[in-house]
Image: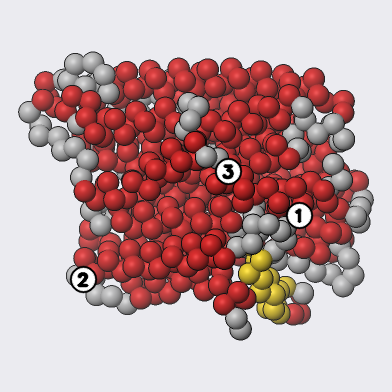
Amino acid sequence: MTWENSAITITTLLPIAGALVIAMMPREKDRAIRGLGIVFTGAALVLAVAIAVGFDYGRDGLQYVLDVDWISAIGVRYHVGIDGISLPLYVLTFLLSFLCAIYSWRYVPDPGRTKAFLALMLLLQTGMAGTFIAFDLILFFVFWELVLVPMYFLIAVWGSANREYASIKFFLYTLFGSIFMLLGFLAMYFQGPDPHTFDMVVLRDYGIAGGFSQTFQLVVFGAVALGFAVKVPMWPFHTWLPDAHTEAPTIGSVLLAGIMLKMGTYGFIRIAIPFLPYGAQKYAPWIGALAAIGIVYAALACLAQKDLKRLIAFSSVGHMGFVMLGIATLTEIGIQAAIFGMVAHGVITGMLFFCVGSIYDRYHTREIAKIGGGMLQTMPKLGGIFAFVAIASLGLPGLAGFWGEVMALLSSFSPNEFVLADQVGLFRVFMVMGGIGTVLTAGYFLWMLQRVNMGTLPDQWREAGLRDVLAIEWVSWGPLLLLILVLGLYPRIVFGVTDEAVSGLLTLLGS
C-alpha cells in the first residue's frame, strides 16, 4: 500500500492511537499526558499539511483514494478520499485540534481528569476528520456518530453549572436528526442501482443521471436535510447550540463551533444536493428562507444576551445562516461562499471562544455587567485581540469574515436561474434580510466591545492583579490571528483549493 493510498487513513486514525496511548498512562503523569496530547495532534497536523502540499490543485476528482471491501454482505466499503471541497475543512480540523491541545497545557477544566479529557478530545478529532473523507454512506454515518459520545462527555463532565441539561439536549437533538438521516441513506441504498451500494460516488452519479424519482427525492431530501440541518444548526433546530456552547469547556466550544457545525453544511454540499438534485431544487427556497430568518433572529437574540459566551454562541447561528443561504442559491459563487464561510467561521469563532475562556479564567464570570468594562486598561493585549476578532466576525473588509458573507449575499441576488428561474425575486428578499443581519451583527458586536473593553475599570478589578495574555495563549492563538488576516487579504488560499471541485460539482448538476 502506497503513501497516497494510506495517507488520509493514517492521518485520520492517528488521534485514536494517541487516545489509546494516553488511556494507558498513569493518572499522576499529568504533564506527560498533556505533552502526549500535543505530540499526537501535532503529528497528525504535520501529516495533514503534507497531504495538502501533495494535493493536485489543478484537477477535479478524488485524490489519496483508498477503496476496499469492509462489510461485503451489505455492500459497505472502506472508501475514503479527499477533494477540494473537503481539504480545507480537513486541515482546519487538525489545526484547531492541535491548538486546543496546546491550550490544554494550562487550561484543563479538571486537572485530576486530564487523561480522560484529552483522550476524548482525540477521539472527537478522528470522528470530525473522518466525516470529511468518507465516501461510503455507512462509513460517513459511523464517523458522524463517533463525535456524539466524546462531545457529550466533554459537556456533561467538564461543563459548567447546567452541563447535564445541555449535554442531554445536545445528545437528543443530534440523535434525532441522525435517525432521519440514516433512514434517508437506507432509502437510497434500496432504491439505488443494482447491485445495491452505499458508495457515495456511485449514488451521486446515479442521482445526477435521474435515477431517483421526483417523489422519492422530495421525501428523502427532507429526511437527510433534517439530519444535516440539526447539526448546522439551522433555525428553528438551533436551540441546543446556545446551551451546549454556554456549558461546554472552552476546548469543547472551540471544536464544536470550529468543526462540528461544518459537518452539517458539508453534508448538504457533499450528499443532499448532488444525490437528490430535484429535491434540492424544490427545497432551495425553503432552505434560503430558514437561513435568512436565522440570520436576523440570531442577531436580535445576540442583542439580548447578558452572558458573553452565550452571545458568541448565538452569533454562530447567524453566521451559519449565511453559509446555508449561499448553499441554497445552488450557484458556484454561493457554494464557494459557503465553503469559505465555513473555514472563516471556524477560525474566527474558534478564536472568540478561546478569548472568552481566558476572560472567564481571569474574571471568573462571563456576565457582561459583572465584567463592567475597562478591559483595555488592565489587559490591553487581551482586550485588543478580543476587539480584533470580534470585528473580523462582524465582517470587516480585509479580514476573514468578509468574503463568505458578501459572496453569499451576491449569490442571493442572482441565484441559479437554471433551476430557480421563478424564485429570483424571493432570493433577493433573502439578500435584503441578510443585509439587515449584517447591520445588526455590527451593532451587537460593537455594543459588546463597548461594555467589555471600554469605559471605566470597576474598582473590584483594579487591584485584582489580572494577567494579560500569557505565553501559552500567544502560541495557541497566533496561527488563528494570522489566518484571520491572511484569509481576508488573500482569500484565494481557500478559493484556489475549492474552485475545481465546486466547478465540477455544478457541471455535473447541469447548471
Which mark is first along the chain, 2 or 1? 2
Decide which of 70, 236 is in the foreground and name it: 70
Kind of residue sitting beneath label 1? Gly
Where residue 316 appears, as percent x and y from the top left, is 50, 35
Kind of residue sitting beneath label 3? Arg
Where residue 492 appears, as percent x and y from the top left, is 58, 43
Which mark is first along the chain, 1 or 3? 1
Task: Report the Cα–Cα distance between label 2 and label 3.
Answer: 44 Å
Task: Report if the CB atoms under discs 3 and 1 are less than 8 Å apart.
Answer: no
Query: In percent of the image, x 86 and y 62: which residue is there?
Result: 192
- Identify the disc placed on residue 492: 3
Q: Residues within 10 Å of mark 1 (few under 14, many from 20)?
A: many
| Residue 465 visible in image | yes
Q: Residue 465 occupies which quadrant of the picture?
A: top left
Kind of residue sitting beneath label 2? Lys
Q: Residues within 10 Å of mark 3 (few under 14, many from 20)?
A: some
Q: Secondary structure at mark 1?
A: helix
Q: Nearer the viewer, mark 1 or mark 2?
A: 2
Residue where numbered disc 2 is placed: 29
Task: Report the Cα–Cα distance between label 1 and label 2.
Answer: 46 Å
